[in-house]
Amino acid sequence: MKLFDLIKTFQADEDGAVTVDWVVLTAAIVGLGIAVLTSVSGGTKSLAGKISSSLSNMSVPTYTN
């Protein structure tokens, strides 16, 4: 009868289920983060290029004494 009691105890144990939930939630958050970075990266590259060209065309006055 010990084997049946051990099986019933193992079946009622839910400690591992919480870990699986956290793994799934973490994977979903990482996936959403990658999706956001992918969709925003084109705009940021374009804006960075505009800022770079604007800064390279500026002249900085120098003052001498």
Image: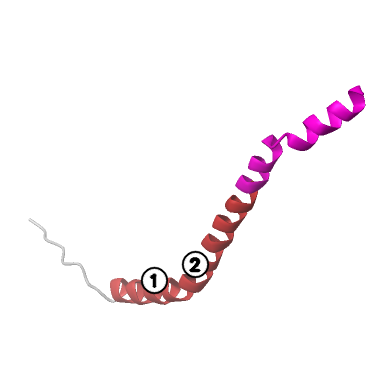
| Alpha carbon distance from label 1 to label 2 | 18 Å
The magenta stretch spans residue 7: yes
Residue 5 is covered by the magenta coloring: yes
> Which secondary structure class fits the magenta region best?
helix
Q: How many marks?
A: 2
View extreme (top): residue: 2
Q: Nearer the viewer, residue 51 or 37?
A: 37
Relative side of 63 to 51, left or right: left
> Which quarter of the figure has residue 46?
bottom left
Kind of element beneath mark 1: helix
**Amino acid of disc 2:** Val
* Residue toward you, 13 or 41: 13
Q: Which residues are magenta?
A: 1-22
Task: Give the x, y percent position of residue 8.
Answer: 81, 33
**Residue picked out by circle 2:** 36
Q: Residue at x 29, y 71 (%)?
A: 55
Q: Residue at x 52, y 60 (%)?
A: 33
Give the mark toward the camera: 1 or 2.
2
Query: Quick one: quadrant of the N terminus?
Result: top right
Residue 12 at what x, y percent from top left? 74, 35
Percent across and percent down for residue 11 are 78, 37
Q: Quadrant of the C terminus?
A: bottom left
Tag 1: amino acid: Ala
The image quarter containing residue 9 is: top right
Q: Is residue 15 above or below residue 35?
A: above
